[in-house]
Image (spheres, grey):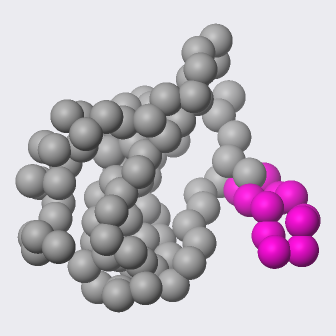
């Protein structure tokens, strides 16, 4: 099944069920923990990740001002959401234009 790994500043690698890092992570965790389901598909999980980062950006200046979402599916290559795929997500979740 899917795996998420975290490499900390000291090089320690840990496997996590859910993961968020950075100054906006408490906000992102709030969204992720309230909406994540084990049976989510990749596309639905990517949308949730986008939403979590969007909420963090709006409430934490240190979270930056843009969102990139990428994933790897079994038997497939690394894939990032395109700008065209992200436009409806920005419209849905980002209340402020930066």
Report which quarter residue 7 is drawn in.
Answer: bottom right
> In terms of depth relative to the viewer, which is nearer, 38 or 52?
52
* x 53%, y 35%: residue: 71
Per the image, is 8 magenta? Answer: yes
> In terms of depth relative to the viewer, which is nearer, 72 or 42?
72
Q: Residue 98: x, y in percent? A: 17, 73
Residue farthest top in this picture: 75
Report which quarter residue 51 is drawn in.
Answer: bottom left
Q: Residue 43: x, y in percent? A: 37, 32
Residue range in magenta is 6-16
* x 89%, y 74%: residue: 10
Q: Residue 69: x, y in percent? A: 43, 46
> 63 left or right of 2?
left
With respect to residue 14, does 71 lie above or below? above
Report which quarter residue 1 is drawn in.
Answer: top right
Residue 9 makes an appearance in the image: yes
Per the image, is 23 magenta? Answer: no
With respect to residue 96, does 47 lie above or below? above
> 60 left or right of 3?
left
Q: Residue 86: x, y in percent? A: 24, 43
> In terms of depth relative to the viewer, which is nearer, 4 or 65?
65
Q: How many marks?
A: 0
* x 13%, y 43%: residue: 88
> 84 left or right of 64?
left
* x 90%, y 65%: residue: 12
Residue 26 makes an appearance in the image: no
> In terms of depth relative to the viewer, which is nearer, 16 or 5?
5
């Amino acid at each position: 099944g899917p795996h998420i790994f975290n490499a900390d500043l000291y090089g320690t690698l840990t496997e996590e069920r859910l993961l968020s890092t950075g100054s906006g992570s408490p906000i992102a965790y709030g969204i992720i923990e309230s909406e994540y389901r084990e049976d989510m598909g990749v596309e639905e999980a990517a949308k949730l990740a986008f939403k979590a980062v969007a909420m963090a950006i709006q409430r934490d200046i240190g979270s930056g001002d843009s969102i990139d979402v990428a994933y790897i599916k079994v038997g497939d290559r690394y894939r990032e959401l395109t700008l065209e795929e992200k436009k409806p997500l920005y419209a849905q979740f980002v209340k402020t234009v930066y």
